[in-house]
Amino acid sequence: VPVRRLDHRPPEWRAESVDLTFELGADRTRVTARTVLRRAPEQGPAPVRLDGRDLILESVRADGRALGPEEYERTADALILPPRSGRVEVEVVTLLAPAANTGLTGLYASGGTLLTQCEPEGFRRITYFPDRPDVLAVYTCTLIADENDFPVLLCNGDRRDAGRRADGRHWVTWVDPHPKPSYLFALVAGRLGRLDGGFRTRSGRDVRLRVYAEESALPRCGHALEALRAAMAWDEDRFGLEYDLDTYTLVGVDDFNMGAMENKGLNIFNSLYLQADPETATDKDFAAVETVVAHEYFHNWTGNRVTLRDMFQLSLKEGLAVYRDERFSGDRRSPGVQRVSDVRALRERQFAEDAGPQAHPVRPDEYREISNFYTWTVYKKGSEIIRMLHTFFGEEGFRKGLRHYLSRYDGQAATCEQFVEAVGEANQADLTQFMRWYGQAGTPVLDVTTHHDPEARTYTLVVRQSCPPTPKQPGKEPLHLPLTLALLGPDGRRLPLRTADESAPAGTERVCELREPVTTLTFADLPERPVPSLLRGFSAPVRLRVPLSTEDRLLLAAHDDDPFVRSESLHDCLVELLLERYHAGAAQGAAVPYPPLPAALTGALAGLLGEDGTDPALAALMLELPGFGTLSGSLDEVDPVRLATVLHGTRAELARVLRAPLLACHRRLDDGRPYVFAAADAGRRALRNTSLAYLAELTDPEVREVLHRQYATADNMTDRLAALTALADHADADEVLEEFGHRWRDRPLVLDKWFNVHALSRRPDTLARVRSLTGHPAYSDANPNRVGALVIAFCFDNPLRFHAADGSGYAFAAEQILRIDALNPQAAARLAGCLGGRGKLDPARREIILRTLRSLRKTDGLSPETSEILDNETTA
Ligand code: ARG
Ligand code: ZN
């Protein structure tokens, strides 16, 4: 049965304090949980219902008295004590087997380390407790363990006391003074090394910063520590928000279902996001570490100090934390480049999700498994909603709004509308209509038509908004959104803006607020037809359709000072070209039967490869061809193999036409300086390796020599992996692939890159190779990173081979979903999403997929997580 948002009721019992004792062992752990629960006397008596899943119960006490089994009720997901009122102290003793817990939720083992993951509903797998985010309590926790196996014992908050027992075990007690919901509880016990640092807050608190990881990984953790310091300083500078405990700890583990987790004062990371050094991490990895470390830190205010009333409000913390990490990452390097790459990712993934069978509102109305809602929509579209508020109110207004929200709800559990209302209140704005963004699924479309009247010297834009139907939401209401625009003259400069009812021009950029299905905007004093620069900065998460000529687009691409519109305009030219070719019916194989590429377009691309003054990081993004997800989003029906073939064919043709500028760019940007992860250097490497990726399409000896030389001489993983990827699909690649696999055989995180290169290969035997790699000694079904690098990558990011017409890719996915589901339902559910949600496939493939899904759905013992996804896929 689904849980519904509108069924929310305040908790019958509030927890005041929780006192936990863990007697830790990998095979057996005993948990004693003593919880003081309270209920206002005037509320009368109510049963005490505590959530719990798959627990072995040793004993229950109420106010110190042991209860017999006849004095409580146990169901599959609860322990219920008979009605009472006032205050009660419940003590529950449960037994866990962490080493056998492969689902990576609750208390589990990663290597020799024991740790917890409680969000969203893992605490109920540790003990019986009101496991809902609006029950906030103060936690005290004592960890007892063998000192040899578990010398490090960590928990939330500050360390209060420690000692050694007669039986040789040691113990540590931690106290977290900040009331928190159970999903923010965490512990770590293991043999880990430590890196120390410090940070003094603005108001003078000296915070101990600590990073724990396997001893051998510590030399690679310095970057994360630096990122943490930068994030702490940034949140003070931007929003005046300071850290609130004396210790802040990051821990890296190898088995983790997502990126990281913001447990109060004790963030736990997938080691992929905690480790980086030049030899083994790419520029993208370095940047991802910064982003994830900052994201978890930002949750300390937006998520922890102010938490969620219920799990439907997930985007209240996730959208906000993503918004904050995107801004932080932009400030670290280039806001414009960051924006362009964030939008690309949103469009490639979130738009596809929003158009498929898994489409759901940023704040869902119902769910069966909340763990299935850690989605692109909740995270990234959620962030776009926050960004629109920033666009409406500006930096100062937004800051005021955020601070107002935080001070009003500090220490409480809040909702999305409380956030939006607080921001509106701080800015004297009514955001009632704006709230629809949280409830309405689907990507809105803006259709714009333009008209220039030379006589009246006016320029008119008519903007129509609409939103396609999504599952359970056939009709949609108009949204309130900001459309940021400018008008450019023939030289590419912004013109002064004056609407018909204004007496004088004001500024050269406007945020127009749209609320109606149709909005007409008229600008005056325009004798010449201007070129419109629309949706600047991607001011709203919509599809914009505006019929501009290629000339106008290329003018914007060359001259607009808004990096998003610049890159978007070139991107649109490429989308148009690729779709035209797709419809023309590309022949498979190497020969491309198209007329030559438009010279103006190849000229623009050549300009980016030369020294035209564009930031190399932006040029690299602009040179990238539109992604498969973005292209299929513009089609009513997709033959994925044909689309992938058009993409590859066009890339190869561009490589032939641009061979000389590509080689020149690659040579020019080789400055021979040692690797540093710094914005400018990373930008040059990105452009250089984008050139390399195009050159990979060519087979002449000079180019092959360039690729092989880069592989052999690279002093860093960014350049080495770029070369490996560029080489991988050719006959002469076996040697380098083998070399890479051998060199990194003992470093799983690096080997994941190698698995990934195989998964994304265009070689015809790719599926066979992927299948055989699932038997590689370093591969494991139980590790989400391995599964992500090989199996999920093949299914999501290799449309050419995954969508093979014989259905072999789908059969492979089904087989993997079953294997993984038996171990880790969350990972299996993620994989199950790959069988749908990818635009509208041609009828033949849809038929095979549906058959595959239906037979999968009939399997006995399928997890609720995977079942929910499969049901969405088969009923939509
Ligand atoms: N709240 C985490 C974040 O910062 C993600 C939740 C982790 N969930 C999990 N099942 N591992 O985005
Ligand atoms: Zn988060």
Image (spheres, helix red, strand yellow):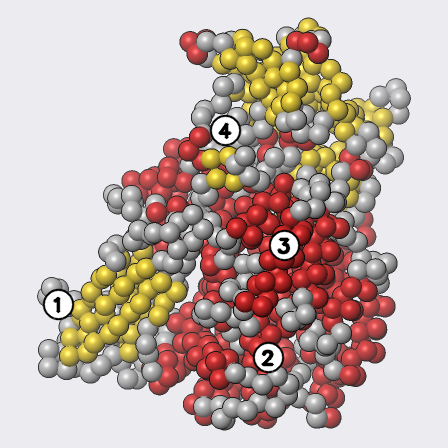
Q: Which residue is mark 2?
A: 645
Q: Which mark is residue 134?
A: 4
Q: Nearer the N terminus, badge 2 or badge 4?
A: 4
Give the amino acid at mark 1. Answer: Ala
Q: Secondary structure at mark 3?
A: helix
Mark 1 packing: few (<14 Cα in 10 Å), some, or many (20+)? Answer: some
Q: Nearer the viewer, mark 2 or mark 4?
A: 2
Q: Where residue 358 sits in the image (x, y, percent)?
A: 52, 52
Disc 2 from disc 3: Cα separation: 26 Å
Against 2, residue 728 (above or below) is below
- Give the side of residue 742 with respect to residue 199, left or right: right
Give the amino acid at mark 2. Answer: Thr
Q: Secondary structure at mark 2?
A: helix
Residue 547 vs residue 427, the one in the foreground: 547
Indicate yes or no: mark 1 CB to ligand 2 under 8 Å. no
Q: Nearer the N terminus, badge 4 or badge 1?
A: 4
Which residue is painted at 68% across and 6% down in the image?
65
Mark 2 packing: few (<14 Cα in 10 Å), some, or many (20+)? Answer: many
- Give the side of residue 420 with respect to residue 357, left or right: left
Disc 4 from disc 1: Cα separation: 51 Å
Disc 4 from disc 3: Cα separation: 37 Å
Residue 180 vs residue 601, the one in the foreground: 601
Q: Nearer the N terminus, badge 2 or badge 3?
A: 2
Against 61, residue 732 (above or below) is below
Q: Nearer the viewer, mark 2 or mark 1?
A: 2
On the image, which quarter does residue 105 sit in? top right
Q: Nearer the viewer, mark 3 or mark 1?
A: 3
Disc 3 from disc 1: Cα separation: 57 Å
Q: Secondary structure at mark 4?
A: loop
Q: Which mark is residue 500?
A: 1
Marks 4 and 3 in Cβ contact (< 8 Å): no
